[in-house]
Image (spheres, rainbow, N blue to C red):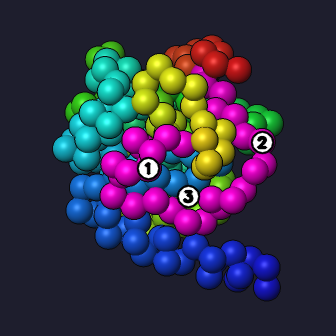
Amino acid sequence: MQKTMLMLDFQNDIEECLKVLRNGGMILYPTDTIWGIGCDATNADAVQKIYELKKRSESKSMIVLVADERDILKYTSNPDLQVFDFLKNVKKPTTVIYDGAIGFAANLIHANGTIAIRLVQEIFCKNLIKRLRKPLVSTSANISGEIPPQFFVEISDEIKNNVDYVVQYRKDDSSSRKPSAIVKWNKDGTATIIRD
């Protein structure tokens, strides 16, 4: 029953987000970590809008969210399957940098061909990505160089007023949240911690 209520709570948000994302727009939305700015990760024009809004250099890659292990297999070439065992044992949301990014907007892929992907567990994000059927960009909801806001109320008007849709779900959530851990997955099946 409670899960059904949650679904109803954000159903309108999902529909509005899908309209915006399919038309190359940007959304402001809650993730499994902090609030993020998102777009279709396969749409280079939409990705460019986020770089411009954040005043961020394209050389600084952004994170991508996926809903399913199969998405990682689809959007990276020859991923080491041991990474899935690693992810099952981590205690906090963890973003993994994979070699061999494929199918993403070119301006999202790092110059060395890597891509940072997080397998998201948060119910809203998971539902949105599954309905979109594409990976979703997730970058902190701040101008580059400023402190990432932990809560919706901390997000600047400059960000709120320049996205195409602001998700209503979890706007009043004051649970303490932090950016994800980031690891680089190595060819020998080990992980190098980039951000703890």
- Image position of 119 (left or right of 15): right
Structural distance between the alpha carbons of marks 2 and 1: 21 Å
| Label ID, residue 176 | 2
Inspect the magenta stretch and tell me whether residue 158 lies in it: yes
Residue 73 % position (x, y): 45, 44
- The secondary structure type at the circle numbered 3 is helix
Q: Residue furthest left?
A: 45
What residue did someone put label 1 on?
160
Q: Residue at x 40, y 65 (%)?
A: 17
Q: Which of 50 and 172 is in front in this view?
A: 172
Q: Quadrant of the N terminus?
A: bottom right
Q: What residue type is labelled 2?
A: Ser
- Residue appearing at x 51%, y 24% in the figure: 146
Q: Distance between the residues labelled 3 and 1?
A: 19 Å
Q: Taking 79 as reference, is 145 above or below it? A: above
Q: Earlier in the sequence, mark 2 or mark 1?
A: 1
Which mark sits nearer the N-terminus, 3 or 1?
3
The answer to whether residue 114 is visible is no
Q: In this view, does 19 lie to the left or right of 78?
A: left
Q: Residue 133 in the image: x percent, y percent?
A: 39, 62
| Mark 1, secondary structure of its residue | helix
Q: Above or below — where is 162 with respect to 94?
A: below
Indicate which label's residue lies in the foreground, 3 or 2.
2
- Do callouts 2 and 1 mark residues in contact (Cβ within 8 Å)? no
- Disc 3 vs disc 1: Cβ atoms closer than 8 Å? no
Q: Which of 110 and 75 is in front in this view?
A: 110
Instruction: Name the disc covering residue 63, or none.
Output: none
Residue at 34% from the left image edge and 24% from the top image edge: 56
Q: Mark 3 highlights which residue?
A: 125
Q: In which quarter of the image is residue 148?
A: top right
> Under tag 2, what secondary structure?
loop
In magenta, the rendered stretch is 155-183
